[in-house]
């Protein structure tokens, strides 16, 4: 049986040159509802859509419970000094091919697209995860047609891992990883 996931503390907020990433609170419900219900923001991941405030509330509480259980999760992202939440970015416990990993998530209001906000937040999250949870690889699942998200993953420090690609809820997933050591070579003859 694997060791339990570490439980961290003291990581309620991260900062970059332009952004504040803070632990989500119940006051983020409107932002969750707006962003997770926006068909443009969810164009490549329609299975993630929320269709009501009640569904947004359930999702936000799931994110908050992850924080309570592990001491990390998805952060609410704002410009420094601003009140408006632009989106959410962080990592959660996950499993890929029976290996424990950190799933990298970033979703932002389309109004904030094109300004490097997603890349800046994702880069900070990957830096933080590597520093504090380095024993676990960071993994991003991205749809083939979502080239903007692929660029964010690459600029955040992840690399393509074609050998891990798989089918996801909304179609094929391309996987990007950081810290994923290659599998050891197979010993013995290889069948042809």
Image: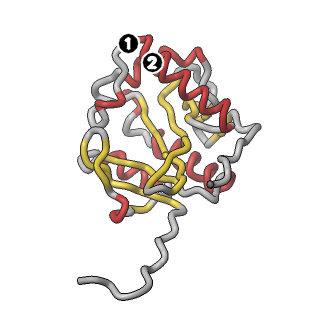
Instruction: Give the numbered dot on residue 164.
Output: none
Q: What element carries label 1?
A: loop
Q: What element carries label 2?
A: helix
Residue 179 drawn at (x, y percent):
54, 62
Task: Count the marks.
Answer: 2
Instruction: Give the numbered dot on residue 52.
Output: 1
Residue 34 figure quarter: top left
Q: Is residue 186 rendered to the left or right of residue 76?
A: left
Q: Evaluate if marks 1 and 2 touch, with contact meaning CB atoms under 8 Å apart.
A: yes
Identify the residue at image location x=59%, y=56%.
136
Q: Is residue 62 above or below residue 115?
A: above
Is residue 78 visible in the rendered image? The answer is: no
Q: Is residue 152 rendered to the left or right of residue 122?
A: left
Residue 188 figure quarter: bottom left
Q: Which of 67 and 183 is in front in this view?
A: 183
Residue beneath label 2, please?
A: 56
């Amino acid at each position: 049986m694997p060791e339990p996931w570490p439980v961290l503390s003291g990581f309620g907020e991260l900062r970059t040159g332009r952004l504040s990433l803070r632990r989500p609170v119940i006051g983020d419900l409107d932002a969750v509802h707006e962003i997770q219900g926006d068909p443009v923001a969810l164009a490549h991941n329609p299975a993630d859509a929320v269709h009501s405030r009640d569904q947004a509330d359930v999702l936000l509480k799931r994110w908050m419970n992850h924080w309570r259980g592990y001491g990390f999760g998805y952060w609410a992202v704002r410009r420094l000094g601003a009140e408006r939440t632009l989106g959410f970015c962080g990592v959660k416990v996950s499993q890929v091919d029976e290996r424990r990993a950190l799933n990298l998530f970033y979703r932002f209001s389309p109004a904030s697209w094109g300004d490097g906000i997603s890349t800046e937040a994702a880069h900070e999250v990957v830096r933080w995860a590597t520093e504090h949870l380095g024993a676990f690889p960071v993994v991003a699942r991205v749809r083939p047609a979502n080239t903007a998200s692929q660029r964010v993953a690459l600029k955040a420090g992840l690399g393509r891992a074609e050998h891990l690609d798989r089918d996801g809820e909304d179609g094929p997933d391309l996987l990007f990883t950081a810290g994923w050591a290659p599998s050891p070579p197979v010993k013995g003859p290889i069948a042809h």
